Image (spheres, rainbow, N blue to C red):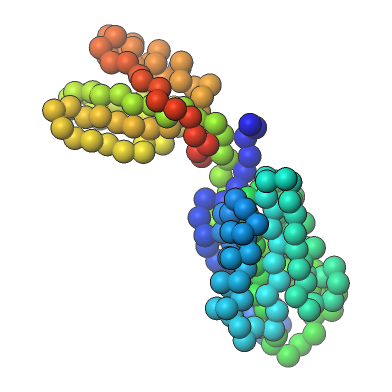
């Protein structure tokens, strides 16, 4: 499976345009059920909003969906979706909530406002790259722990857990094609004392 970009966290941001308040919500999702549940959650939270526009893109069956939620056709859902597609992110849902401020924005103004709402939502959610990673375990002496942490940071590993017992057992993920590089560096740094044990694979963020 190829690398892909998504958002790291559920987040939100807002701005005011001619007294209309636009709130952009974003969440990483993997299925239509998750996307619909998130949309319904925001609609319930903002039941009194003028519009709750949304768009989502999924890796699952290359699904793309959007809704203008009462705004003129092509001025809301499509711009939100377009920003997602241009950013190259997937497994993501954006809901753009609008409270009308009394001033009409016109078709062009709506497109710009909903595009901006989608953009600030994605930025708030932190766009990351996901790739196939090895899940790796290793155990090192306490005296080597700081150097091991520095080494993991240098190669872009994500520490999953750290168990402090007789020694320090680390479980982490690392992009699969960097595993050999890490083992070489670890061998050099520890004079061959420590080795890596690959226990599986997952998709995780990479740096």
Label count reads 0
Q: Which residue is drawn at 46% across and 20% down?
A: 179
Q: Position of residue 201 (x, y in %)?
A: 48, 29
Image quarter where the N terminus lies is top right
Q: In which quarter of the image is residue 36?
A: bottom right
Q: Can residue 26 be seen in this view?
A: yes
Q: Where is residue 115 in the image (x, y as percent from the top left)?
A: 73, 64
Q: In this view, does 93 lie above or below 4?
A: below
Q: Quadrant of residue 196?
A: top left
Furthest residue toward top = 191
Q: Residue at x 52, y 62 (%)?
A: 11
Q: Is residue 119 above or below residue 198?
A: below
Q: Where is residue 16 in the image (x, y as percent from the top left)?
A: 64, 78
Q: In which quarter of the image is residue 25?
A: bottom right
Question: Relative to 163, is 151 on the left or the right?
Answer: right
Furthest residue toward bottom = 102
């Amino acid at each position: 499976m190829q690398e892909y970009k998504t958002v790291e966290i559920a987040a939100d941001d807002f701005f005011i345009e001619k007294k209309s308040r636009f709130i952009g919500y974003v969440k990483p999702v993997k299925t239509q059920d998750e996307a619909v549940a998130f949309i319904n959650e925001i609609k319930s939270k903002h039941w009194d909003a003028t519009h709750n526009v949304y768009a989502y893109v999924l890796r699952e069956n290359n699904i793309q969906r959007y809704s203008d939620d009462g705004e003129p056709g092509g001025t809301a859902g499509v711009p939100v979706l377009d920003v997602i597609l241009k950013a190259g992110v997937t497994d993501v849902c954006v809901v753009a909530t609008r409270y009308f401020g009394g001033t009409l924005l016109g078709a062009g103004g709506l497109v710009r406002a909903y595009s901006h709402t989608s953009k600030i939502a994605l930025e708030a959610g932190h766009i990351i790259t996901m790739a196939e990673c090895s899940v790796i375990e290793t155990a090192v002496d306490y005296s080597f722990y700081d150097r091991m942490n520095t080494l993991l940071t240098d190669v872009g590993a994500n520490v999953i857990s750290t168990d402090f017992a007789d020694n320090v057992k680390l479980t982490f993920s690392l992009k699969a094609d960097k595993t050999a590089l890490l083992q070489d560096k670890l061998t050099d740094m520890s004079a061959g004392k420590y080795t890596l044990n690959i226990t599986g694979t997952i998709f995780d963020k990479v740096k």
